[in-house]
Amino acid sequence: MPTINKDQCGIDLMRDGIHAVTVIDAKPQTSRAGNEMIHLRLEDIQTKERCSTNIVFTAKTGRIISAFCAAIDLIMPDEGGEFLLEARFCRGRVLFIDTAIDDSAEFGEQVRVTRYLTRDRAFKLRPELEGLGIPENSPFKLPMVLSGSPTATTQTAPRSKRQGWTDEEFRAEMERRAAAAKASLEEPFNMPEKDDFDMSPPAAAA
């Protein structure tokens, strides 16, 4: 029997423009190219329209990840080195996005997130949002990955016991991460100065 998910029906298709959204779900997944990513389900606070997007971890997506963290008030550590960005840190948080609708013969209309915006930038570009009483996020400083940790990148943060880990290593790492996340809530933070990162494809050469 043919089936279809309601999300595919287009009834809640998010129109293009600037939106204040809530991250209603975030799940770790793997892209077709084999890269780890976070799949986000987003809902417009005002209209309840929905869309989805992915935060993919590759050597080329650092700029997008920085923009996303600034927009959702996840504070990257000032120290150099690697840090954790996990799906659970994103759920329930408010995010400001700019979207466009792409249309293709194969997939029809698809909503694409073109950039992430900070709260102040979104209010400047769409002033009517400021009067809606949109909740503010509590800033959260992302925990560092300590040197020598069995997992040394954000892409490979353990969601379960990884191959090659002993029970003691896994427990120690998870305890360390829990302690780091708890401590980060008590530390001061500095918001990034740049508040707008355009993620549109580069313009074609003339």
Image (spheres, rainbow, N blue to C red):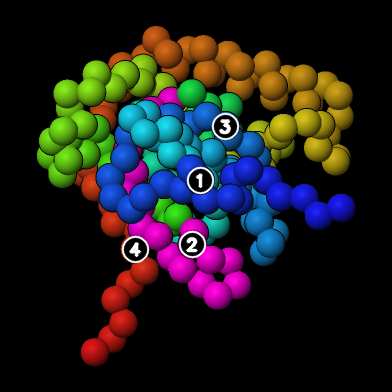
The span shown in magenta is 93-110
Judging by the rendered image, the residue that carries numbered circle 4 is: 200
Q: Give the label on residue 173, or none.
A: none
User: Identity of the amino acid at label 1?
Assistant: Ile
Of 42 and 171, the residue lying toward us:
42
Q: Give the label on residue 109, or none.
A: 2
Question: At x 31% / y 82%, what residue is drawn?
Answer: 204
CA neighbours of label 2 inside 10 A, class few (<14), some (14 to 19), many (20+): some
Quarter of the figure that contains the C terminus:
bottom left
Query: Could you tell whether 202 is left or right of 91 in the image?
Result: left
Of 97 and 159, the residue lying toward us:
97
Q: CA distance from mark 2 to mark 4?
A: 17 Å
Judging by the rendered image, the residue that carries numbered circle 3 is: 25
Residue 52, position as x, y percentages in the image = 52, 46
Q: Give the label on residue 11, or none.
A: 1
Instruction: Say whether disc 1 or disc 2 marks the residue closer to the N-terminus.
Output: 1
Query: Could you tell whether 98 is left or right of 180 in the image?
Result: left
Residue 1, position as x, y percentages in the image = 87, 52
Residue pushed farthest bottom? 206
> Residues at badges 4 and 3 in contact (C-beta under 8 Å)?
no
Position of 118 relative to 73 (above/below): below
Is 94 contained in the magenta span? yes
Of 22 and 117, the residue lying toward us:
22
Query: Could you tell whether 127 is left or right of 85 in the image?
Result: left
Instruction: Say whether disc 3 or disc 1 marks the residue closer to the N-terminus.
Output: 1
Position of 94 relative to 100 (above/below): above
The answer to which image quadrant residue 173 occupies is: top right
Question: At x 52% / y 29%, what residue is drawn?
Answer: 24
